[in-house]
Image (cartoon, rainbow, N blue to C red):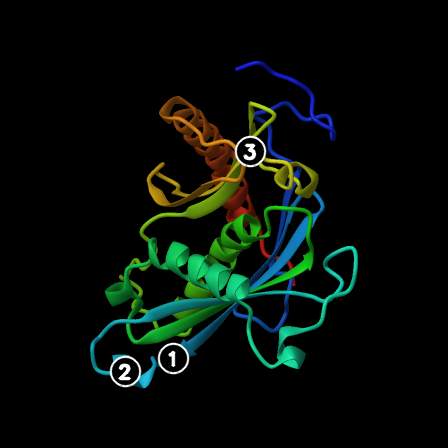
Amino acid sequence: MTETLRADGRTNDELRPITIERGWSDQAEGSALISYGRTKVLCTASFTNGVPRWMSGKGKGWVTAEYSMLPRSTNSRMDRESVKGKIGGRTHEISRLVGRSLRAVVDMKALGENTLVLDCDVLQADGGTRTAAITGAYVALADALEWGRSKKFISQKAQPLLDSVSAVSVGIISGVPMLDLAYTEDVHADTDMNVVVTGRGKFVEVQGTAEAAPFDRSELDTLLDLALKGAVTLTEFQTSALTEARER
């Protein structure tokens, strides 16, 4: 693949600068402030001993997520959805995506009858907010599970986490496949795709759309290879964040 420099100086297969500030919130059982370049998402995990009534007595836990964008996460202010009186379709879609992605790597029986809610709030948006949310939410989830174990809500022998999970965007712009699209790239993409991948390199979800010209099988393979390469690096960032001493 031809390597060309993008507007921000990256090569086609290069992620934006990634940072994960673990334990950002003092109140939450798990939290992480994650940045994909200028995109910044605060992910918090809330642990509750108990499950929704419809799951009670089944010996399994539950993991769900909520996603939102702050009014000035974008260039112009947008109204809060709570003020509008309804949650938008995009918000619902991304919330469900984050929840599915995290449930894919959690053993609900090992979790026991406990509930984890992941809140992903976009502080600043510059493309890739849903992928950053998934990657950061995993770090918050992992810490919340350890909190539950420390409080003996989870058995010391149980291993609720089956794997890690991260996500990244890829796309084709002017015929060129690129990894981790910033907003200015995303809006001009011929093909736009979000890929959710486990630490072992298994796909959880692939969301791909031909925004302009349809893509062929070889282009799809190229995009998936780019996503897998990016996911390897994201997993390394997650692992590094989770092995560092937590600062309070």
Classify the position of the C terminus by image quarter.
bottom right
The numbered dot on residue 119 is none
Residue matched to label 2: 54
Q: Residue at x 70, y 39 (%)?
A: 184
Label 3: state its secondary structure: loop
Q: Which amino acid type is shown beneath numbered disc 1?
A: Asn
- Left/right placement of residue 184 relative to residue 56 reads right
Q: Earlier in the sequence, mark 1 or mark 3?
A: 1
Residue 103 % position (x, y): 35, 59
Q: Residue at x 72, y 59 (%)?
A: 73
Q: Residue most toward the left?
A: 58
Residue 91 % position (x, y): 54, 64
Up the image or down, 32 lies above or below 222; here it is below
The residue carrying pointer 1 sits among few (fewer than 14), some (14 to 19) or many (20 or more) residues within 10 Å by Cα, namely some
Residue matched to label 1: 49
Label 2: state its secondary structure: helix
> In this view of the protein, which residue sits in the foreground, 68 or 45?
68
Q: Residue most toward the right?
A: 76
